[in-house]
Image (cartoon, grey):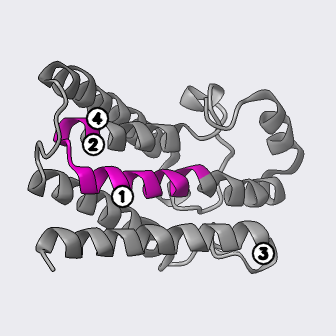
Amino acid sequence: MTIITTIFIFGLFIALLTLTTIIWSIFYPEKRIWPPKKYTYLTPFIVWVPTFTLFGILIFLGVLEWSEFYLPNWVRYWIGVPMIILANIAVWYEAWKFGMKQTGWAIGTLRTDGLYKFSRNPQYVADISMILGWIILSCSPMAWILWAVGILVLIAAPFSEEIWLKETYGKTYEDYLSSVRRFF
């Protein structure tokens, strides 16, 4: 087994385990794993370790398989690079406004301003865009496959989170829910 295959399988395992956790949480909200029922000192590790590991694996696969399939350079550099930059700006701007604790599911205030005026999940939309930009830039087949599974995670996550948001913010969230789209 090559290093690329090993890394790919590890990334696929993380993505599928995360997806399974989210699906479990959707169907069994009283026994949910995501979002955590209580914020503890372990919560940031539960949130950030799988996320950054999967992102790191996508980057690593992209580097190892650089240009394995063809896309014109104008697509790779004039579409892929701006997507990465703009999506990073969006993600980190909103994370900064939230604060790292609240981004990791500590109770705070319901955000409905900034990019949240246009999408209930702008950070997920930006994550999807950022990863797609990297996939376009790197032209890595294994990263494309892993990206597809990662997309399922990023699309499913809000469904488990909305249950928690309704419990936590009540009518305020229900009003927001009815006036702003889930993604875009």
Spatial CA distance of label 1 from label 2 is 10 Å
Residue placed most toward the observer, 32 or 147: 147
The three-letter code of the residue at mark 2 reads: Ile
**Distance in Å between CA atoms under marks 1 and 4:** 17 Å
Q: Residue at x 60, y 57 (%)?
A: 157
**CA distance for labels 3 and 2:** 34 Å
Distance of mark 3 from mark 1, alpha carbons?
26 Å
Is residue 4 on the magenta stretch? no
Q: Nearer the viewer, residue 154 or 76?
A: 76
Circle 4 sits on which residue?
Answer: 84
Helix, strand, or loop for circle 1? helix
Which of the two labelled residues, at mark 4 and mark 2, occupies the earlier sequence position? Answer: 4
Is label 2 in a helix, a strand or a loop?
A: helix
Judging by the rendered image, the residue that carries numbered circle 3 is 28
Magenta stretch: dominant secondary structure: helix
**10 Å neighbourhood of mark 3: few (<14), some, or many (≥20)?**
few
